[in-house]
Image: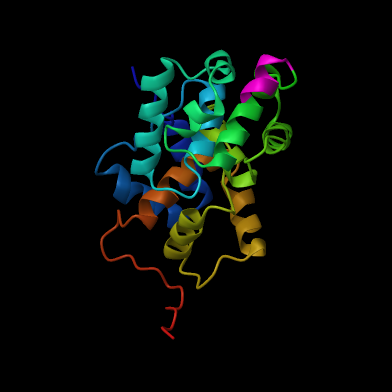
Amino acid sequence: MTRYFEYGEVELAHLRAADPKLAAAIDAIEARGHIRRAMDEDLFQSVVRSIVGQQISTAAQETVWRRMVERFGAVTPETLCAASEEDVQGCGLTFRKTSYIKDFAASVRGGCFDLDAVAAMDDEAAIDALCSIKGIGRWTAEMILLFCLGRPDILSFGDLAIQRGMRMVYRHRAITPQLFAKYRRRLRPYGSTASLFFWEVSHGAIEGLTDPAPKKRRS
């Protein structure tokens, strides 16, 4: 059964009270139905899927992941350590991604990387731990915290779609680090729920709401 990121009236009431402009966006989107964003069930697989998905489309990521499941039966530290680099790469991965995934599987299987310990850490400590994995940067770590561990307060400055959604809601031509920090404070402790709505806005969920960012001139 698919697990979805959970939010409800507690989160929505807080965000509505904290931010009238976001409240209007929430009302418009919720009128069409609850946002359902699927969650990863397993932290190991979430990391591997994240490495697989870097710099490729979602459809390509799903294709590679399906090949891995078909080839190895289950994507675990044991199956990936037992597989040759050629077998892993044969699923459609680059040499570099294959190396990252094999290294990560070996570190988990050998006890050098403790997944349970990461799951118990606070957000910043967990992000730092995940960023120690080759191929994982801050944005990827933040997405793992949100869409695998279900952390309630993840709002990523590094996410371009979130920045676009914020520009559209707040009518800024750009989201500077200073502006982002202001909204970040305002939306705590439910930044993850706010992220869902910024993503929806950025994807055109509110008819007629445009992006005020300056258009790039063609050379």
Front residue (pair 145, 30): 145
- Give x and y (percent) for residue 138: 64, 45
* Residue 190 appears in view: no
The kind of secondary structure the magenta stretch mainly shows is: helix
Instruction: From this view, report whether residue 219 is shown above or below residue 15.
Output: below
Q: How is the image coloured?
A: rainbow
- Give x and y (percent) for residue 197: 41, 47
Please report the residue visible at 56 percent of the width from the left and 23 percent of the height from the top: 44
Instruction: From this view, report whether residue 49 is shown above or below residue 177.
Output: above
Check the picture and name the quadrant holding the C terminus: bottom left
Front residue (pair 48, 81): 81
* Residue 173 appears in view: yes
Instruction: From this view, report whether residue 211 is shown above or below residue 197.
Output: below
Front residue (pair 98, 28): 98
Front residue (pair 182, 82): 82
- Give x and y (percent) for residue 140: 57, 42
Q: Is residue 71 magenta?
A: no
Please report the residue visible at 24 percent of the width from the left and 43 percent of the height from the top: 32
Horizontally, is 66 left or right of 150 in the view?
A: left
Check the picture and name the quadrant holding the N terminus: top left
Toward which corner of the image does residue 43 lie, by quadrant?
A: top right
Please report the residue visible at 43 percent of the width from the left and 83 percent of the height from the top: 217
Magenta stretch in the rendered image: 105-111
Q: How many marks?
A: 0
- Give x and y (percent) for residue 193: 47, 40
Toward which corner of the image does residue 21 lie, by quadrant?
A: bottom left
